[in-house]
Image: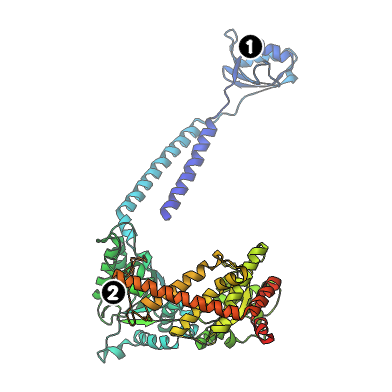
Amino acid sequence: MKYLKKQGIFLIVFTIIAGLIVFSTMKNEPQSMSYSKLLTEIQSGNVSSIVLKGEMAEVQLNSAVDENSSATTYEIVVPPDITSASERFTQALDSQLIQSFSVSKPMEIPWWFSAVTTMGLVLLMVVWFGVSQRQQGGMGGNRVTAMGKSRAKLLEDDHKNVNFTCVAGADEVKEELEEIVEFLKAPERFVDLGARIPKGVLLIGPPGTGKTLLAKAISGEAEVPFFSISGSDFVEIYVGVGASRVRDLFAQAKKHAPCIVFIDEIDAVGRQRGANAGGGNDEREQTLNQLLVEMDGFGINEGVIILAATNRPDVLDPALLRPGRFDRRVTVGLPDIIGREQILNVHAKGKPLADDVKLGEVARLTPGFTGADLENLLNEAALLTARGHKKEIGNEAIKEAAFKVMMGPEKKSHVMSDRDKKVTAYHEAGHAIAIKLVSSSRNVDRVTIIPSGMAGGYTASRPTEDQSYHTKSQLIEEIIIALGGRAAEEIVLNEISTGASNDLKRVNQIARNMITKYGMSEKLSNMIFENDGAYDGLDYGFKNCSSEIASIIDTEVKEIIDHAYQRTLTLLHENITKLNRLGEMLLEKEKVDGPEFESIFQAA
């Protein structure tokens, strides 16, 4: 960057001096005029001025004398019978036309001005060329060294405001990580007992659960320097650069010990070797090899703790996870209802909440939300409140923000045909009726036919409690609920539409997982079948089953879906009145909330 600034300054100065020289030497080339012609123009009063230049004279006319030329500046050569231009023009002036024009001599530019300017330009070019060569030579000599420098950001003071009080909903995780803090504060207490502190701690969990925040909180609690870098910052197109950056990072960390090195998204550099399609010893694998060597290289209890975060632990190289490298793995999962309430309390600070807002109730209605989702929820609620010119964030704003976070903004201006509205209304009504009739763990919260995000309409439901496991009957319930939309279309409209494509995709995935992952098959009970596309995301089929078994799997999946669909049709036929009433209400109001939906069943 400094090199580019210097180059820019030299270029600007060079351009200015060159412009001055060109301007000082630039002149209009006048046309020639005879002396007799000049006298004619003087007598006609067309001469504006005459500038004497030794044996030459420059004449400026008031108007052009030639119809084919617009020139008004001419040059006069002194006739041989007149010794000087002064005498010649004195003769012309004696003709009592002295007041028709002015005669003057030009201001002469010193000879040394052009010489100094030219020498300055040459000197500037020499200096510029020399500096450029030196800089380019330096960059050429240090290019690899500069690229091999670690891109880790060293935070020594900014992170001290972040501590464990900023992290909510992860009490057990904080308890496990407090050991790292205590070691960084008082390492002698552990060393005297012969204890070996873990060299590396791997934080595993879904995106948005607070892994990076936890790493900063550890550093803030221990009050030690904090190096932060992403796994992708190590990898370059040039072979050896990533390994050089790893070496430089660990060298810096040892100088600042005790300290914390945090590698975010470590799966970008730590993926299992040989898993890529090309195989071989590519740049990423060399970088990983160097990381493994460095983690083995620094001694026990040196005060350098390596923290890393990933949401793909399944793709990491086993050598990275063995004892002596990442000794400890800490799972940062989705917060439960108590954790969600704690997180909401943290993010609600500084936000004026109305009296009707109960964060415990908000936590109950947001299962599956991460800490980032909850922060976004309150932020969206604040934006909706500001748009409505209100001073306090109310319960209604939080509810609308929750739907916006889950489904995306409503497209109220989207124009739908009457037929599309009817298809959407009965499709969503089918989902809602199915939830009410078969679900043992969910309640309908809202049904709408207003497009949101990628959906033409949606049926929102909330679980009555947090669940870690699902039974076979609950998975069948999910399939029936997903098929409710298509079944309603078939019953009411006597045909089916493409609106159920996502529902069918989910239905097939649940049914196939029941057979291949959960061992819930009647014919293949307690058997699971792994997919071979573990590292590249592609489906290469199952690697531990024959074609006959694969055929049985397909048959079982179809039987589950067909049986669930027939049950869905039966349930909707038995409740056709409620289905029609809800469909008509959606066509009229476009949105039906939970209490209004419950009133349909209470009135029947």
Q: Earlier in the sequence, mark 2 or mark 1?
A: 1
Q: Is residue 375 left or right of residue 511?
A: right
Q: Quadrant of the N terminus?
A: bottom left
Name the image quarter holding residue 49. top right
Pointers 2 and 1 in contact (C-beta within 8 Å): no
Residue 541 location (% of width, % of height): 33, 67
At a point 54% along the width and 78% down the height, the residue shown is 568
Residue 484 location (% of width, % of height): 55, 75
Q: Secondary structure at mark 2?
A: helix
Q: Is residue 71 above or below residue 209?
A: above
The residue at which mark 2 appears reads as: 320
Question: Which is in the foreground here, disc 2 or disc 1?
Answer: 2
Q: Is residue 449 left or right of residue 167?
A: right
Residue 169 location (% of width, % of height): 48, 85
Q: Secondary structure at mark 1?
A: helix
Q: Quadrant of the C terminus?
A: bottom right
Query: Which residue type carries mark 1?
Result: Tyr
Query: Which residue type carries mark 2?
Result: Leu
Name the image quarter holding residue 518. bottom left
Q: 440 or 261, which lies in front?
A: 440
Q: Is residue 416 left or right of residue 228?
A: right
Name the mark on residue 35: 1
Q: 305 or 440, which lies in front?
A: 440
